[in-house]
Image (tube, rainbow, N blue to C red):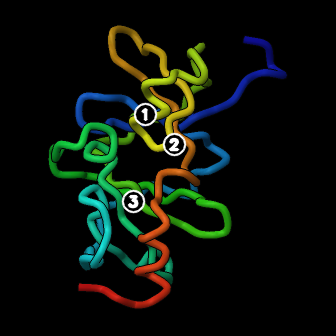
């Protein structure tokens, strides 16, 4: 990969998958914070947490990808979602790496992730998925946060 086309990503473990988050979208990784449930959100939304003084939705990345609950998260990763911030609950932060070669626009992944999954590839023998953070958070999460309707 040439220096011009190099894109660094943060690799995280979400259940049985490794996910690549574009480093430009990552703010920080930290220990899990207390989470309050949010009414009217999908099952992969754990609730909201106060991140750096502002409410942010917390999403279980393993459940988002598979629909099944994953292991208990050991880290949160805050990511930029346009002008807002969300926290992704993950099992582990692996580290920063150049983006490996991946197939872009994998149709099955696009449908499964509601447009949040940009590409798929392999990291050794494990599935690697590249996420678009801005598309991970469903609109009803922002509505719940804006309306203050925490359960």
Question: x and y percent of residue 39 in the render?
Answer: 27, 78
Which image quarter holds the N terminus? Answer: top right
Q: Is residue 22 left or right of residue 68?
A: right
Residue at numbered disc 3: 30
Which image quarter holds the C terminus? Answer: bottom left
What residue appears at the point 49 percent right and 74 percent down from the top-left corner?
Answer: 142
Q: Residues within 10 Å of mark 3 (few under 14, many from 20)?
A: few
Question: x and y percent of residue 9 in the render?
Answer: 58, 34
Q: Is residue 47 above or below residue 1?
A: below
Residue nearest the viewer, comparing 14 with 134: 134
Residue at numbered disc 1: 19
Q: Is residue 56 above or below residue 31?
A: below
Which residue is outermost to the bottom? 148
Residue at numbered disc 2: 116
Residue 129 falls in image quadrant:
top left
Q: Secondary structure at mark 3?
A: strand
For the residues labelled 2 and 1, the Cα–Cα distance comes to 12 Å
Residue nearest the viewer, comparing 132 with 126: 132
The answer to whether marks 3 and 2 mark residues whose Cβ atoms lie closer than 8 Å is no
């Amino acid at each position: 990969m040439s220096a011009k086309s190099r894109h660094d990503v943060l690799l995280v473990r979400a259940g049985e998958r490794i996910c690549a988050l574009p480093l430009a979208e990552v703010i920080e990784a930290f220990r899990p914070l207390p989470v309050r449930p949010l009414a009217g959100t999908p099952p992969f939304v754990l609730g909201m947490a106060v991140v750096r003084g502002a409410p942010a939705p917390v999403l279980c990345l393993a459940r988002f990808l598979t629909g099944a609950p994953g292991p208990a998260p050991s880290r949160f990763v805050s990511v930029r979602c346009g002008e807002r911030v969300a926290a992704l609950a993950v099992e582990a932060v692996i580290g920063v790496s150049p983006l490996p070669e991946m197939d872009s626009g994998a149709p099955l992944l696009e449908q499964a992730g509601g447009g949040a999954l940009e590409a798929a590839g392999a990291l050794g023998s494990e599935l690697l998925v590249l996420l678009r953070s801005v598309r991970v958070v469903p609109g009803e999460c922002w509505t719940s946060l804006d309306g203050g309707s925490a359960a």
